[in-house]
Image: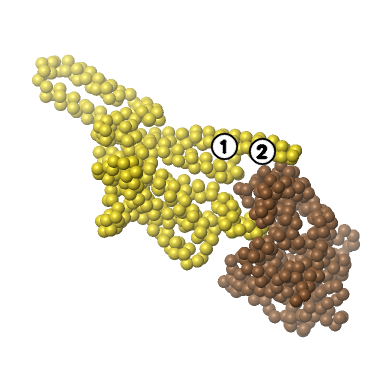
Amino acid sequence: MQKDTKYLLEIKDLYLHFTTQIGPVQAVDGVDFKMKKNEAVVILGESGCGKSSLTKAILRLLPRNVGKYEGKVLLNGEDTMLLDDEDYRQQIRWKKMSLVPQAAMTSLNPVLKVGDQVAEPLIIGEGMDKDLAMEKAAEYFQYVGVPVDFLSRYAFELSGGMRQRAALAMALITEPDLVILDEPTSALDVLTQCNIMNLLKRIKMENQASFILVTHDIATSSELANRVAVMYAGEIIEVSDSEIFFNKPLHPYAQKLMASVPRLRGNDELEFIVGKPPSLIGLPEGCRFAPRCPFKHERCDKNPPVVEIGTSLVKCWLHTDSK
Amino acid sequence: MTDKINKTNKMSPDSKRTLKRILKYSAIRLVSLFLTVMVGIFLTIMIANMGGYVDELVKGQVNENLMMRVANDPTYKVMTPERRKTFFQDQLELEYERLGLNQPFMVRSFRFLWNAMRMNLGSAQQMTSDSGSKQVKLIITERLAPSLLLMGTANLTLFFLAITVALTLSRKYGSRVDKFFISLSPLSSMPSWFYGIFFILLFSAVLKILPFSGMIDSPPPRTTGGYILSVLRHLILPASSLIISASFASIYSWRTFFLIYSSEDYVEMAKAKGLPSKLIKRRYILRPTLPTIITSFSLMMITMWMGALLTEKIFGWPGLGSVIVAAVGSFDTAVIVGTTIIYGYLLAITVFVLDFVYALVDPRVKVGQGGN
């Protein structure tokens, strides 16, 4: 069987549901998604649309109350869902995929020196000599702009931005194929956000690394993205190249989303989207955005198909005719 | 090469800083613990003397004794009433001075305190030591070693046992084993001496495999090995009743601590980093939880020392507990105060050692403006 390695990451029909007392939470509900090597893909969406759950599903970081977890996650053409937990840990974790967490403030062990934590994947995962690993950690600290003597500090002695940089160094140190950044800047002030985004741009240019950046911040993501995926209520509703997306998004939700972002030039009044995103428990049939959609019509009661327009994919009835 | 030199140069002020921090921390803790012990002892002195009322009782007793003597002795009958009255008064003052009652109680209580803090414990009113001395210090020191042996064994075993079980249970949250242990936690509401009685009944009376009481067979074995073995055999029941009564509650609460700390983000990060679960358990759950557990342990230890008094009595363990029970029974104030002082010091030392461990385990513990 020939493996299709055109794509670095290929997700097919991925589901992640959580069981709760009031019913299953359909956090990731049939996601299809592909990305090429050296691409930076931004996953956009409002809070509670399942973005973080998608990263958890990709990285197999499952909480206790998982109800349904199935689908395919192909990394370099190999289905990681077929590996058992121990193989997955040894072959995939931090070797192929690493994570920059949402809350770097709390993602570092408070009683362990930062340097030890950054070098840990090398020492434990790759069996590297400790001194050598620490030297490499120092190298990466310099690279992300943290003073090298912070290696022997504890997390509480670092500022928020420093911790985020340390987390970044930790994610890069094993040179994984894919780095997943889960809202890496959302807990930081604007200046630090800007610094981190610039750093990410530099890393992307110099390392040819592949990124998945999960965020709700459209403005900062526009600088980094090659491709943009929009998530709504557990589904990916549009995937486009970033030039196309930021100029002329296809899905009504994406259009509304873009209209809500302030622009430097132009006097357009800022719009907002009426209503709120649906609860992920007991989702109705049909298009999930329909109750808030200005273009709603009869067909929206049925689940819309995914339409391919050029390089874009969109899940909406409106575009079925234009095909 | 230069990198390495740099590194070692940078490490030394760092570790120096840590040492300085810990020294300063311990000094402050020592002083504050000493003050705590002092207040505790002073309160004991006040209570044992009923706030000076015992002085009044003693005075009354002396007064009456002297009066009886003067009234009954024919040699005083020849004196004139005035002469007899001044003689009586002189005798009374002499007696007061002998007993130190001529000074106000507040002054005396501070002298008691000063003596007590210097471990100058005076002599017992009723009790004698095993070697026949009346010295309170001797009565206590004779019994100190067995008490330390029992409490040390029980505390250390409890600490490691409860930590291991609690950590294992927290990783199996919601499982049948977990539910079983949690349902057992009310068993801790029974005091250790209750388990003592139960164990004696079961293991000594019915099964006849362990001794009823005491610390050593009589006659004591001649060889050192036999001696140690005999002590160990006697140690099993009292130690396990202390451990059992405290273990269910501590397993329950420590399991909860472990659960809280396992939901921290850095534990998930450690998992994402592909660390083996044993390492995550040790480095990312046990280490960060340890300070909390040590706090809980030192609080629990205080209750355990109290429970040990009766447990020692029940097992006939020749420790401080037996002494204090006997002293209370015979109203021997000097011994009561003496044992309280020793308990106070022991507890203070224990808490101090645990605090020291705490400062070592948690880098965030800082005193003054230590660190950078």
Q: What count of labels does the image hold? A: 2
Point out residue B231 in the picture as x, y percentages from the top left corner: 33, 45
A232 sits to left or right of B162 = right
B358 sits to left or right of B240 = right
Residue under the point 69% across and 74% down: A71
Camera-side residue of A317 and A292: A317
The circle drawn on residue A230 is: none
Which chain corresponds to the colour brown?
Answer: A
Residue position marked by numbered label 1 in the rendering: B22
Camera-side residue of A239 and B138: B138
Residue A311 seen in the current view: yes
The C terminus of chain A sits in image quarter: bottom right
B300 sits to left or right of B10 = left
Point out residue B16 in the picture as x, y percentages from the top left corner: 62, 35
The circle drawn on residue B11 is: 2
What is the three-letter code of the residue carrying label 2? Met
Q: Measured along the vertical axis of the image, is residue B340 above or below residue A138?
A: above
